[in-house]
Amino acid sequence: PHLVHELDATVERQIDALMRRMGLCFGSLDLIVTPEGEHVFLEVNPVGQFGWIADETGLPIYERLADLLIERA
């Protein structure tokens, strides 16, 4: 199942550092959370598909992406 999951501050910082290092302001990241609670990074796609996950989870991805584009304009 695909579920909404709150990332801890350490993982958020690691993702922020990765995105900065790659020069990306947006990316679709694939992560797995193991039964032990470990976050396993799989990939980041700078032009990834996200509509299906927004529909499945109700996350406001379109709204956040629009905010990002307006902020950078």
Image: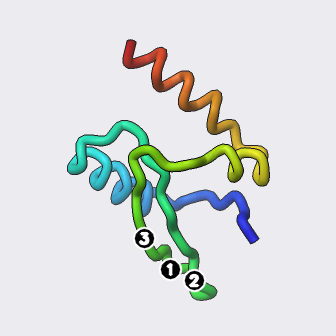
In the image, what residue type sits under mark 2?
A: Thr
Task: Confirm or deny contact between disc 3 and disc 2 (CB under 8 A).
Answer: no
Circle 3 Cα neighbour tier, 10 Å, few/some/many (<14 / 14–19 / ≥20): few
Relative side of 55 to 60, left or right: right
- State the residue at coordinates (61%, 58%): 6
Residue sticking out furthest to the left: 21
Q: What amino acid is found at the position of numbered circle 3 in the picture?
A: Phe
Residue 10 in picture, x, y percent from top left: 40, 62
Chain-order first, disc 3 or disc 2: 2
Please say if the residues under marks 1 and 2 sit with CB atoms less than 8 Å apart. yes
Which mark lies nearer to you, 3 or 2?
3
User: Secondary structure under badge 3?
Assistant: strand
Q: Label 1, label 2: how many angstroms apart (C-alpha)?
A: 5 Å
**In the image: residue 25, left or right of residue 56:** left
In the displayed structure, 46 sits above or below 12; it is: above
Q: Amino acid at mark 1?
A: Glu
Q: CA distance from mark 1 to mark 3?
A: 10 Å
Label 1: which residue?
38
SS label for mark 2: loop
Q: Looking at the image, which is closer to me, 43 or 67?
A: 43
Q: Position of residue 33 (x, y in %)?
A: 57, 76
Residue 56 lies, in percent from the top left, at: 78, 53
State the CA–CA distance, disc 3 to disc 2.
11 Å
Question: Looking at the picture, how far across and down is residue 40, in whole percent?
Answer: 46, 76
Q: Residues within 10 Å of mark 1 (few under 14, many from 20)?
A: few
Q: Quadrant of the N terminus?
A: bottom right
Q: Which residue is mark 3?
A: 41
Say what secondary structure mark 1 lies in: loop
Which residue is under mark 2?
A: 34
Q: Please report the residue visible at 21 percent of the width from the left and 50 percent of the height from the top.
A: 21
Is residue 20 rendered to the left or right of residue 37?
left
